[in-house]
Amino acid sequence: MDVSIQVIARMRSDFPCKFGIPRQSGLVESLRSTIVFEPAFRNPDALRGIEEFSHLWLIWQFSQALRQGWSPTVRPPRLGGNTRMGVFATRSPFRPNSLGLSSVRLLGVEHTEDFGTVLHVGGADLMDGTPIFDIKPYIPYGDCHPEATGGFTDRAGQFLLQVDFPARLLAMLPEEKREAVLGVLSHDPRPSYQHQPDRVYGLSFAGYDIRFTVQEDRLTVREVQKI
């Protein structure tokens, strides 16, 4: 049986490519993104009452990870990229249907002239342009499970880095973007298998190219250029 699914909206975020996007939603709450609905779904009635919720679930597509076929096992980055786990026991983008699930904070509902009603959200882990298939409210009494266990992720560690971002370089970014970029860098954007201290990495964020190195648990920003 064929199943059809429609793109209802797209994410507008500060990430033009995959590198540097937080590995889970909610890790960097200061990230700001906007959900823009496709023309066929710009009916304000479809959002009636949504402002009463603090958080939303987004169902979306790993549009940059599409591939033919699938593998029953994957290698989670948080396990170093060497240990295989069942695909359905992970949040790997390489899945049979390439679907992602994210919980985001609803920051505001705005009525615009060009795009109809848009949603401003915080803590999203989606690349700019990511297709969104559905939006559902987060319901605390059913969705929150304080007793839940995290499987292998409980043993994987936090991987947080100390970030040395020289003031003169940080000042090159818009003030409203600075807290977010510090949060993104602290969560170690590098692939888990790369630990070369002399390698210079590049993060594209909010229209800037941010170059950095990592020595043990300290990340140092070396250069910032406007793209």
Image: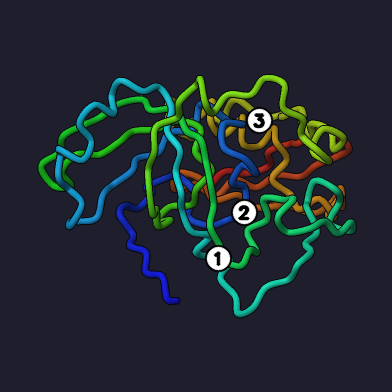
Q: Amino acid at mark 2?
A: Phe
93 left or right of 37 in image:
right
Q: CA distance from mark 1 to mark 3?
A: 39 Å
> Can the viewer see residue 138?
yes
Q: Around disc 2, counting alpha carbons within 10 Å, would you say few (fewer than 14), some (14 to 19), or many (20 or more)?
A: some
Residue drawn at x 43%, y 52% as measured from the top left: 128
Locate residue 34 relative to residue 157 in the image: left or right: left
Q: Of residues 182 and 78, which is closer to you in this image?
A: 78
| Mark 2, residue position | 19
* Applied colour scheme: rainbow
Residue type, numbered disc 3: Phe
Question: Would you call the spot at circle 3 few (<14 residues within 10 Å), some (14-19), or many (20 or more)?
Answer: some
The residue singled out by tag 1 in the image is 97
Element under label 1? loop
Question: Can see residue 169?
Answer: no
Q: Is residue 65 above or below residue 100?
A: below
Q: Nearer the viewer, residue 62 or 85?
A: 85
Q: Residue at x 64, y 52 (%)?
A: 202
Toward the bottom, the furthest residue is: 68
3D distance between C-alphas at marks 1 and 2: 22 Å
Q: Are marks 3 and 2 in contact (CB under 8 Å)?
A: no
Q: Which mark is residue 165?
A: 3
Element type where label 2 sits in the image: loop
Residue 53, picture quadrant: top left
Q: Residue at x 72, y 27 (%)?
A: 148
For discs 1 and 2, the disc positioned in front in the rendered view? 1
Q: Position of residue 193 (x, y in %)?
A: 85, 55
Q: Nearer the viewer, residue 144 or 36?
A: 144
Disc nearer the start of the sequence (1/2): 2
Front-most of residues 149 and 124: 149
Residue most extreme to the front? 1
